[in-house]
Image (spheres, rainbow, N blue to C red):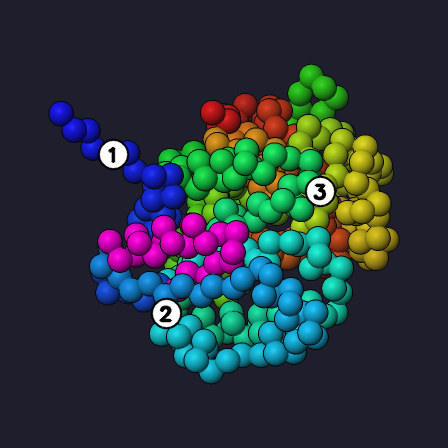
Amino acid sequence: MSTRPSVAPEAKFARSILNQYLKVRPGENVIIEGWSHSLPWATALAREVRRLRAYPLVLYEDEEAFWDGLAAKQETLYGAEPAHEWAALGKTDVYVHMWGPGDKLRLTKLGPRAERAFAWNENWYNTAAKAGVRGARLEIGRPFPSLAKAYGVDEEAWTRQLLEASMVNPAALQRAAAPIARALERGHRVRVHDDQGTDLTLGLSGNRAVIATGTPTAQDRKNKYRILSSLPAGSVSVALDPTVAEGTIRANRSCYSDTTKATGGVFEFEGGRLVRQHYRTGWDEMFKAPYAKGGRDRDRPAQLRIGLNPKLHDTPQLEDIEAGAITVAIGTNRFLPGGKNKSRYFGFVINAGAAVEIDGRRLKLPRAA
């Protein structure tokens, strides 16, 4: 008696991305952008596109070849906009992007040369928006040996979390998000507290909350920079009243940047302003210089975000969307409805597991699986 073979993880992943999130339809043109380290995922996505009777086109870049070209000072060539690639983009319905190059630490050291190598970026968004593209940027392309070492995480465990979190049903994320968004939009005061020294009160002012569940919406496609949803997804974000903040929040999650991380963050507020900002590690690398240049209102409360994804735990670059994670940010919030803070600074701390009350009423939050 034969048994039906189980579906490989890569195939399950591809089906989740293309069916649940991007809803690829027969006859659509799909571009998949991948690198050496993400080729297995690109291959699985191409197979799934064909299974859906759509048309895949894989844009592939080899990591070693990329660095060879930069060693030969070809960054201006890299930054060009080849007519054949742009023509394909103009005929594309769905775009799936995976991060590259993999060695972000090496890329950061290039400085202005890296900017020239990616000079096409702004016009990419213009062309994609004109074509009506919808798509996703997949975090599964981020894990890389040098970056895992810099973060102090296990690359295999990191990848596994991203795989599982990318297969969470977006409808479940939406169900979890809806009552949280309503409460944030209708409330006046938020209290975040735990038994480890966090007790912070923040102000709400009726701003619209932004729900991110990974499925592109009509509203997203009105903003060219939101054409590509980030996956995994799962958060509710709202701009805060910049004049209200009293108390302390202590982080129990790391803050990750493209190349490093900060730990042990503490924000202390009085009279609507940050009066003390401390990190156990990573302050100099991540926040010191940007804060010094942040300008006016860099110390004002800017954003509250609540994470929804149950398959993440202190995950690099996704630490803020872990289920039950509460992010409090200061500085700029112009990217959110009602956000008027024009500071050049954006600093944040994250506490996962604290209680949240809105106008004295406990808010039910999702928790990690």
Please determine whether, in this image, residue 337 is positioned above or below residue 59.
Answer: above
* Residue 20 can be seen, yes or no: no
Q: Is residue 174 magenta?
A: no
Q: Name the residue: 61% across, 34% down.
A: 154
Which region is colored magenta? 31-51
Looking at the image, residue 61 sits to the left or right of residue 135; the answer is right
Estimate the x, y position of residue 63 in percent, counting from the top left: 58, 60
Of the numbered discs in the image, which one, if any, rests on residue 150? 3
Viewer-side residue, 339 vs 315: 315
Residue at image position (30%, 38%) is 7
- The residue that label 1 is drawn on is 5
Q: Earlier in the sequence, mark 3 or mark 2?
A: 2
In contact (CB < 8 Å): disc 2 and disc 1: no
- Disc with the residue nearer the chain's start (1 vs 3): 1
* Near-viewer residue (24 or 326): 24
Circle nearer the viewer, 3 or 2: 3
- Tell me: residue 93, above or below residue 1: below
Q: Position of residue 124 (x, y in %)?
A: 52, 72
The amino acid type of the residue labelled 1 equals: Pro
Of tags 2 and 1, which is closer to the observer? 1
Residue at image coords 38%, 39% = 9
Tell me if residue 105 comes above or below residue 85 in the rendering. above
Quadrant of residue 250 in the image? top right
Q: Nearer the viewer, residue 368 or 71?
A: 71
Q: Residue furthest top?
A: 195
Mark 3 surroundings: few (<14), some (14-19) or many (≥20) residues within 10 A: few
The residue singled out by tag 2 in the image is: 92
